[in-house]
Image: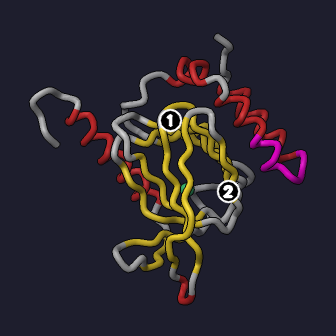
Amino acid sequence: MARFDRDQFVADCLTAVRSGDPAHKQVKEIVDRAVSNPSGISAEVGDLTHDPMTTIWHRSDELTVLHIVWPPEVELFPHDHNMWAVIGIYGGREDNQFYRRIEGGRIEPHTGKTITERDVIGLGSDVVHSVANPTREWTAALHVYGADFYSTPRTMWRGATLEPLDLDTDLFEETLSAAAARARLANIPGERP
Ligand SMILES: [Fe+2]
């Protein structure tokens, strides 16, 4: 089994970002290479079912690298990034619903795309999406963003009417952790979440 080296992965992404445009294309190739070896990443990362679901591998103004686990049966509210993103799956499945922006800062559902193990998608900085894992499996993904994922002002859309609000990254983590807790409970024989 080929080894996956997390520090080398981050270093390669940083080199791509610092080499200039188009950094996201180079990063896509780096993520492609990484997720083509799922067992290598799994050996480095270990058990997916423990909190936190999001682990920060690198965070700076120029780059954020995250390891994100989508617990079974989770659905995350629509949000934008305001920076390019490259997302690679190395286990499980992630359903992306894309939205188009309409008047008044609102959005409406547009297209969708399901990605599974070894798939990589690149998202432009104006993309709005929501993400779901409708399966009983734990989905594991590498996420690379072209700026600081946590301090960049962003928007989320909540409720039946999809009202735009300032994005709260704590809510992002809380949603994943709550789904993880439900999934752990559901895996105990005789228990129901
Ligand atoms: Fe996203």
Which is nearer the eye, 56 or 86?
A: 86
- Residue with the mark numbered 2: 123
Which is nearer the eye, 4 or 122?
A: 122
22 magenta-colored: yes
Quadrant of residue 13 in the image? top right
Is 187 displayed left or right of 59 in the figure?
Answer: left
Position of residue 158 relative to residue 19, above or below, is below
How many residues crowd around disc 1 within 10 Å: few (fewer than 14), some, or many (20 or more)?
many
**The furthest residue to the bottom:** 104
Which part of the image, by quadrant, shows the C terminus? top left
Location of residue 182 in the rendering, given as x and y in whole percent from the top left corner: 24, 42
For the magenta stretch, what is the residue range?
A: 19-28
Position of residue 83 relative to residue 183, above or below, is below
- Residue with the mark numbered 1: 140
Is 49 displayed left or right of 57 in the figure?
Answer: left
The amino acid type, in three-letter code, at marker 1 is Ala
Whether disc 2's CB lies below 8 Å from ligand 1 is answered yes
**The furthest residue to the top:** 1
